[in-house]
Image (cartoon, rainbow, N blue to C red):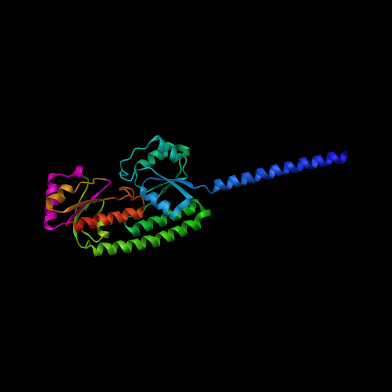
Amino acid sequence: MNHEKLNLIDSKTTRGIAVIVLLLMMTTALYARTSTAPMPIVTTTSLLQCAVQDVGGSHVKVTTLVAPGSCPGHFDISPRDLHTLSTSKAVFTHGYEEFVPKIMSSLGSRKPKLVAIKTSGNWMIPTVYIGALKLVTNELCAMDPSHAADYRKSFASQSRKYQALSTVLKARLKKSGVPGNRILCSDQQVEFAMWMGCVVVGTYARAEEFTPALLHQLTKIGRKNHVKLCIDNLQSSPTAGKEIAKDIGAAQVALSNFPGGYSGTSKWSECLTDNVSRVIKGISRK
């Protein structure tokens, strides 16, 4: 009888241990899934979104605040944005967005880490963008050391890819006769225009800042220099140079400083290629 009771106790003990082991295995599996979940990151612009995604890959989940067709200087935060920010690991900014300090202070103890990726120059220029990728890589490695090797590998791979793209696009521009052409352009597109080899003979700001005297001066400069193209900035005044171009017999295009401004350009490389194609098409028309 005692032997039967002992067997019964042993049987119950074995089942108990099995249940405990199973629970531990389930807990471990759950923890593993949680620990490998993408790190939630918020970016202020689509440029930063592309940079973080290029480096972070599957290790990050990126949400962007400012729509790509909008100017970061004119942005109104929504309750939904505040919730997204409060549940994120970090918010990546350019450092110039005036709305950021205000929304960060409103989050109180729920605010994420603030990361400013400060680099001079137009981010649509390959060398500038690659420099930004390097800064993003350093930040992600510091925030998530367990995947640092992956981040560095992605940076190296993307750098080679974009250097090669730059070479290809430069060749296209040269073949199409873009370098050396004199242009008028938005002050937001000067650096990119110079990267393409254009000679900028005059610049202008937003259309609402135009005066009759300024329009007369720009028209005079355009005619004197036989300008073939006026380049506007999509995010500020996409048609600012349209009337000037019409008056001097030049073509007019609007380029985007942020990926996603035009359909099919959600990636940085797509936006760069699209901008170059628009300029080539504009020059060829004249």
- Residue 224 lies in the magenta-colored region: yes
Inspect this view and state whether residue 100 appears. Answer: yes
Q: Nearer the viewer, residue 264 or 229?
A: 264
Q: Seen in the image, is 252 located left or right of residue 5?
A: left
Counting from the top left corner in percent of width and height, residue 53 is at 42, 51
Inspect this view and state whether residue 191 appears. Answer: no
Counting from the top left corner in percent of width and height, residue 187 is at 24, 51
Q: Residue at x 45, y 58 (%)?
A: 154
Q: Seen in the image, is 83 located left or right of residue 222?
A: right
Q: Residue at x 19, y 60 (%)?
A: 181
Q: Nearer the viewer, residue 257 or 171?
A: 171
52 over 73 or under it: above or below? below
Direction top: furthest residue: 79
Direction right: furthest residue: 1
Counting from the top left corner in percent of width and height, residue 24 is at 65, 45
Q: Residue at x 15, y 47 (%)?
A: 243
Q: Quadrant of the C terminus?
A: bottom left
Q: Which residues are magenta?
A: 207-235
Total residue callouts: 0
Counting from the top left corner in percent of width and height, residue 206 is at 22, 45
- Residue 283 lies in the magenta-colored region: no
Q: Residue at x 24, y 56 (%)?
A: 279
Q: Quadrant of the N terminus?
A: top right
